[in-house]
Image (tube, rainbow, N blue to C red):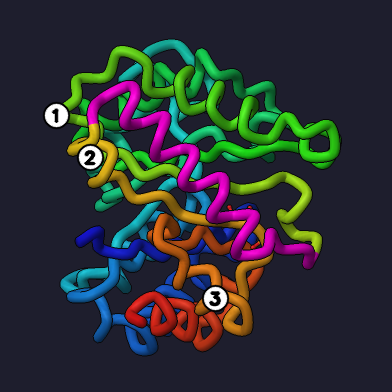
Amino acid sequence: MRKPIIAGNWKMNLTPAESKTLAAAVVAAAGAHTGDVDVVIGPTMISLSAAAEALAGSGVGLAAQNIHAEAKGAFTGEVGASMIASLGCTHVILGHSERRTYFGETDEGVFRKLRAALAADLTPIVCIGESLGERKAERTLEKVNFQVRAALAGLDPSDVPRVVLAYEPIWAIGTGLTATPEQAEEVHSEIRKTLADMFGDDAAAQVRIQYGGSVKPGNAAELLAQPNIDGALVGGASLKADGFAAIVAAAKG
Ligand code: 13P
């Protein structure tokens, strides 16, 4: 009943011209699946416009990798939610662990950006996940629950189904290490319990929870077969249209 969502996080890669080419290739390779799977690509800020041209009319969604929490103002170097929406963005990735680690993104910042995204009619993809040290100390569920509660606290229950969560164990990002389907499912089902505790069973049952961290064509199907894994947030493997399309096809089941 939850429509799977496969999103590519292109991170800091590709020029606008290269992004347009890859976006067109994604449309060609995966555009036919958008009735069954939400397909989204996430170029850099400066490539959103070029990518949007290639996506026009395709049904493939467009995500920015960050926004500022305020709509506009004296915030040099930043971009507001309605600005990316005006370029054709449908989604925005929030709180990615790279932003938390390298750019000081805080739970408070994610909380505010989530509200800014919803106000601009964007679908927020909120990233959460534990470090290797936290997993070894058996603090994974505690960490992830804390991040979910911090980001979503006080949200109107009617807005909750609009939110996508992405569980990305930090130790699995860009390392070639992937959580086993069982490890991922344990966390995803815990997240859904937390959502149910916060917002009730109905809202919790509607929220899509993606897995991210070294998702590839070869491991996508077994991850996506888990009952609480509703999609994937794909880094490296999203930079090749064929591989990304294979992950989209795996989500179709
Ligand atoms: P990789 O798929 O390259 O591990 O990256 C995952 C990620 O960070 C997606 O947001």
Instruction: Look at mark 1 in the image and give the residue it sits on.
Output: 158
Expressed as whole percent of the image width and height from the top left, the position of residue 29 reads 38, 88
Expressed as whole percent of the image width and height from the top left, the position of residue 249 reads 39, 84
Quarter of the image with the N terminus in it: bottom left
> What type is the residue that disc 3 sits on?
Glu
Instruction: Look at mark 3 in the image and give the residue it sits on.
Output: 222
Look at the numbered discs 2 and 1 and tell me whether their residues touch, using CB distance below 8 Å: yes
- Nearest-to-viewer mark from 2 and 3: 3
Up-down: is 251 above or below 118?
Answer: below
- Position of 39 with respect to 133 (left or right) is left
Residue that appears at 43% across and 43% down: 165
* 234 is within the stretch colored magenta: no
Q: Say few, some or many: other residues with alpha carbon within 10 Å of mark 1 (under 14 / 14 to 19 / 20 or more).
A: few
Residue that appears at 52% across and 52% down: 44
Up-down: is 157 above or below 140?
Answer: above
Q: Say few, some or many: other residues with alpha carbon within 10 Å of mark 3 (under 14 / 14 to 19 / 20 or more).
A: some
Marks 2 and 1, Cα distance to the nearest angstrom? 7 Å
Look at the numbered discs 1 and 3 and tell me whether their residues touch, using CB distance below 8 Å: no
The disc placed on residue 161 is 2
Q: Secondary structure at mark 1?
A: loop
Q: Say few, some or many: other residues with alpha carbon within 10 Å of mark 2 (under 14 / 14 to 19 / 20 or more).
A: some
- Position of 203 with respect to 143 (left or right) is left
Look at the numbered discs 2 and 3 and tell me whether their residues touch, using CB distance below 8 Å: no
Towards the viewer: 54 or 102: 102
Marks 2 and 3, Cα distance to the nearest angstrom? 25 Å
Q: Secondary structure at mark 2?
A: helix
Expressed as whole percent of the image width and height from the top left, the position of residue 214 reads 68, 65
- In magenta, the rendered stretch is 176-200
Up-down: is 123 above or below 216?
Answer: above
Mark 1 or mark 3: name the one nearer the start of the chain.
Answer: 1
Up-down: is 190 above or below 235?
Answer: above
Q: Secondary structure at mark 3?
A: helix
